[in-house]
Image (tube, rainbow, N blue to C red):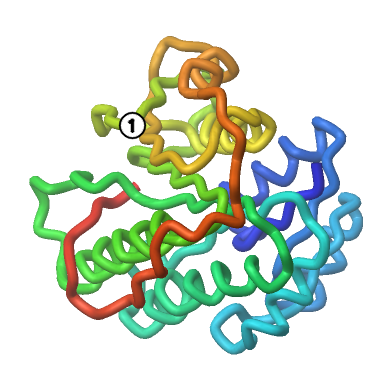
Amino acid sequence: MNVFVIGITGKIGRLLMQELLSRGDAVHGLVRRDEQRADLAAHGVDAVVGDLAGMSVEELAEAFGDVDAIVFTAGSNGGSREFTKAVDGDGFVKAIEAARRAGVVRLAHVSVFPEAWRERDLGDEVEYYFAVKKEADMALSRSDLDWLIIRPSLLVDDPGLGTISLGPAEFHGQVARADVAETIAELLHEPGIGRQILELNTGSTPIRDAVKANAHRRQPDAGQVHAAPVPLRRNQGVGGKN
């Protein structure tokens, strides 16, 4: 498989890169600096230097090239409103349109758990981040792409267990980033997964079995238009934090 990762220098992005390479996949990514590109090249990864916020749709589509799938795992994680809007909001909508123009139908979004940390006073910027992530999910789910939305629970840097709980609705707990990366790779390689929202938590089911349990027999029709994408607006809805 030929995969382009937006957010490849992040914690999940780098783990996903390693997981895909171990499977023999070709991996590409978007980086902001030349030294990051050189570092990834040493691992056999072809990266494009560019700023998601500043790139045009045409430039991003050219960066994608002829890949089989795109994974969007970039995010502000509750940083400034400006950065959240530029990356998680406008940047994600740009990625949807760029995927269309490049002829790439499979786009996976690493999103957030809707009810995460509801017991906490998170502050306006984090709440805004949740809202933008939810609107991004809406935009993707109403697109004509062969989309996938993955909502992991609280991310931790513990060693991966190799077992998870995966489904349309899961309890929010925590999950190792290594398990998230392995799950994403497995989902990309499962042809029966598509046009689904899957929540991900620590569990007792082996990752491959959990993915197979959520697969369904289908004939993807990425050319069928289901609904127009929803433009992102400020302060609409509340999502969750991973």
Q: On screen, 51 above or below 25? A: below
> Which residue is farthest front?
224
Q: Circle 1 is placed at which residue position?
A: 168
- Amino acid tagged 1: Pro
Image coordinates for residue 188, horizontal then vertical, percent: 64, 37
Which quarter of the figure has residue 80?
Answer: bottom left
Residue at point 56%, 30% (across, down): 218
Residue at point 59%, 17% (across, down): 208
Left or right of residue 152, residue 114 in this image: left
Image coordinates for residue 6, horizontal then vertical, percent: 63, 62
Which quarter of the figure has residue 37?
Answer: bottom right
Q: Quadrant of the N terminus?
A: top right
Along the viewing direction, whichever of 8 and 66 lies nearer the viewer:
66
Image coordinates for residue 52, horizontal then vertical, percent: 60, 78
Q: On screen, 74 above or below 169? A: below
Residue at point 75%, 38% (across, down): 20
Residue at point 45%, 81% (across, down): 86
Q: On screen, 105 above or below 19? A: below
Tag 1's secondary structure?
loop
Along the viewing direction, whichever of 98 and 16 lies nearer the viewer:
98
Image coordinates for residue 160, horizontal then vertical, percent: 55, 25
Q: On screen, 13 above or below 157? A: below
Left or right of residue 175, residue 46 in this image: right
Q: Residues within 10 Å of mark 1 (few under 14, many from 20)?
A: few
| Tally of marks | 1
